[in-house]
Image (cartoon, rainbow, N blue to C red):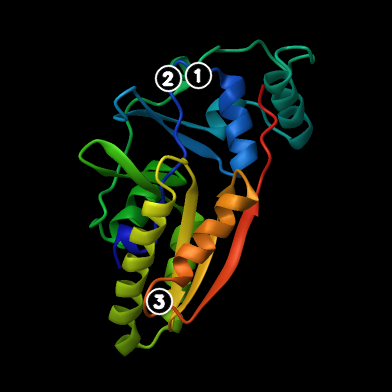
């Protein structure tokens, strides 16, 4: 099994000049704990995680106070002085990446060795997806349930569904994970609106070979601004 078979495609990204408040809001809105950081050309230049934003803060109460401080532009009382104002100041610059052909076993090894929870998937230096621990668990669980003779067919169908969704979702910045078992497609991810979610589900249904689509897309309303 390779990265392309388990990754969430179209990872949400952020620019280095964005504020840490914006990064925190994106993580909460999209229900993710890390964001690849890209420059104006879309090249990967770093990664920022929930752990980076929270720093050395420990305990649920302290974490909540810190997030309140970040998201309220400093109107709340901070648990400690802020360490940075922009994503570029706080991000990790040496990013461990994978390609679509990287074996899942290698990704697991990198996560374990480096103590990380997500690895961006790149083509050239452009982010095309991201693999998280939950992606790995879902992919490995699915593989364990599938008969060997069905693997190639289902994975080929997943590739066709991904291509269709990338065409439909181009320019939207959405993050979607696709699982396929015996022709049944399951979509997971956070959507900015119901219209886009419906379009992606409809697009998946149009792919030849798809027997059914299980819609687990979640619509989140951003409160940034």
Q: Which residue is mark 2?
A: 16
* Distance from Cα at disc 1 to Cα at disc 2: 6 Å
Identify the residue at horizontal 75%, vertical 30% (top origin): 64
Where is mark 1, residue-wise? 18
Query: Residue drawn at (78%, 12%), measured in percent from left and top?
Result: 75
Question: Does 148 appear above or below 134?
Answer: below
Give the SS element for disc 1.
Answer: loop
Asked if residue 197 lies left or right of residue 141, the reply is right
Q: CA distance from mark 3 to mark 1?
A: 39 Å
Q: Choose between 133 and 111: the one closer to the eye.
A: 133
Q: Give the number of the disc on residue 83.
A: none
Q: Is residue 55 at least partly visible in the picture? A: no
Q: Nearer the viewer, mark 3 or mark 2?
A: 2
- Image marks 1 and 2: residues in contact by CB distance under 8 Å: yes
Say if 160 sits above or below 84 in the image. Answer: below
* Residue under numbered circle 3: 143
Q: Position of residue 112 (x, y in %)?
A: 40, 50
Quick check: can you spot residue 210? yes
User: What distance separates the C-alpha of mark 3 from that of mark 2?
Assistant: 37 Å
Q: Is residue 30 left or right of residue 70?
A: left
Q: Quadrant of residue 73?
A: top right
Badge 3 density bin: few <14, some 14–19, many ≥20, Cα 10 Å:
some
Looking at the rendered structure, the number of numbered marks drawn on it comes to: 3
Q: Position of residue 49 (x, y in %)?
A: 51, 33
For residue 177, side relative to residue 70 (left or right): left
Instruction: Name the element at disc 3.
Output: helix
In this rendering, the label closer to the viewer, 3 or 1: 1
Q: Earlier in the sequence, mark 3 or mark 2?
A: 2
Quadrant position of the C terminus in the picture: top right
Q: Secondary structure at mark 2?
A: loop
Please state, as top left, top right, bottom left or bottom right, where the N terminus lies in the image: bottom left
**Does 125 appear above or below 90?**
below
């Amino acid at each position: 099994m390779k990265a392309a078979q388990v990754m969430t495609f179209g990872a949400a990204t952020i620019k280095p000049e964005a504020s840490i408040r914006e990064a925190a809001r994106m993580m909460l809105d999209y229900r993710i704990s890390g964001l690849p950081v890209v420059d104006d050309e879309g090249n990967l230049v770093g990664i920022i995680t929930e752990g980076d934003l929270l720093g050395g803060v420990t305990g649920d109460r302290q974490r909540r106070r810190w997030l309140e401080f970040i998201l309220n532009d400093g109107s709340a009382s901070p648990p400690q002085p802020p360490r940075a104002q922009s994503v570029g100041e706080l991000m990790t610059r040496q990013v461990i990446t994978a390609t679509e052909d990287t074996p899942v076993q290698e990704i697991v090894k990198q996560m374990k060795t480096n103590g990380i929870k997500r690895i961006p998937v790149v083509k050239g230096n452009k982010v095309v997806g991201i693999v998280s621990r939950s992606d790995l668990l879902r992919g490995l669980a699915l593989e364990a349930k599938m008969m060997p003779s069905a693997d190639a067919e289902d994975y080929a169908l997943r590739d066709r569904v991904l291509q269709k969704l990338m065409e439909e979702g181009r320019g939207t910045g959405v993050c979607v994970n696709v699982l396929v078992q015996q022709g049944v497609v399951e979509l997971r991810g956070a959507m900015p609106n119901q219209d886009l979610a419906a379009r992606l589900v409809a697009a998946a249904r149009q792919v030849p070979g798809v027997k059914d689509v299980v819609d687990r897309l979640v619509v989140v309303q951003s409160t940034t601004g």
